[in-house]
Image: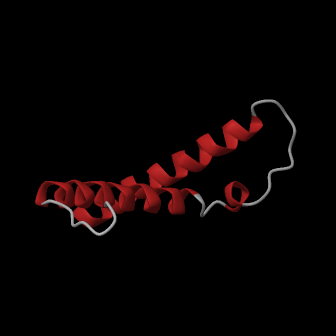
Amino acid sequence: KPKSKSLTDSQKEENRKISSFRILVEHAIGSVKKCRIVKERFRCRKFGFDDLVMLIACGLHNFRISISLIVKHI
C-alpha cells in the first residue's frame, strides 16, 4: 500500500486472494519439511541425490494428503 493512502476495495480483495493462496503454499512447504532430511543441511554430494530427496519428500506429502482425504470420506 502506498504511504499514507488506503487501498481500494479491489486491491484489498486481490490481497485476500494472494494471502489465501500463500497460506496453502506455506502449509505445503511445512508438510514437506516434516521429513527431517529436507529441513537440515544436506551433506550428500552425489549428483541428483538432493533432487531425489525433495521428490520423495513431496511424494510423501501428497500421499499424506490423499490418505487424509480418503479417511475423511469413510
The quarter holding residue 53 reads top right
Closer-to-camera residue (25/51): 25
User: Where is residue 51 shown, x and y percent of the image?
Assistant: 68, 37
Q: Nearer the viewer, residue 53 or 14?
A: 14
Identified at 32% across, 54% down, the residue is 21
User: Horizontally, is 1 left or right of 29 in the view?
Assistant: left
Q: Is residue 4 left or right of residue 11?
A: right
- Image quadrant containing the C terminus: bottom left
**Residue farthest front in this picture:** 4
Q: Position of residue 28 (x, y in %)?
A: 46, 57
Please tell me how many numbered marks the rendered image carries: 0
Q: Position of residue 65 (x, y in %)?
A: 40, 56
Instruction: In the displayed orientation, state which residue is furthest to the top.
Output: 47
Residue lying at 54% horizontally and 51% vertically, measured from the top left? 60
In this rendering, would 14 be left or right of 65?
left
The x, y position of residue 24, in whole percent, is 37, 58
Q: What coloring was used for the rendering?
A: secondary structure
Residue at coordinates 46% horizontally, 60% vertically from top-left?
26
Extreme residue toward the bottom, this view: 4
Q: Is residue 56 above or below residue 36?
A: above
Which image quarter: residue 71? Answer: bottom left
Residue 74 appears in the picture as rendered: no
Q: Quadrant of residue 7?
A: bottom left
Tell which of 29 and 36 is nearer to you: 29
Residue positioned 75% across, 31% down in the render: 48
**From where the camera sits, is residue 60 visible?**
yes
Left or right of 62, for residue 15: left
Q: Quadrant of the N terminus?
A: bottom left
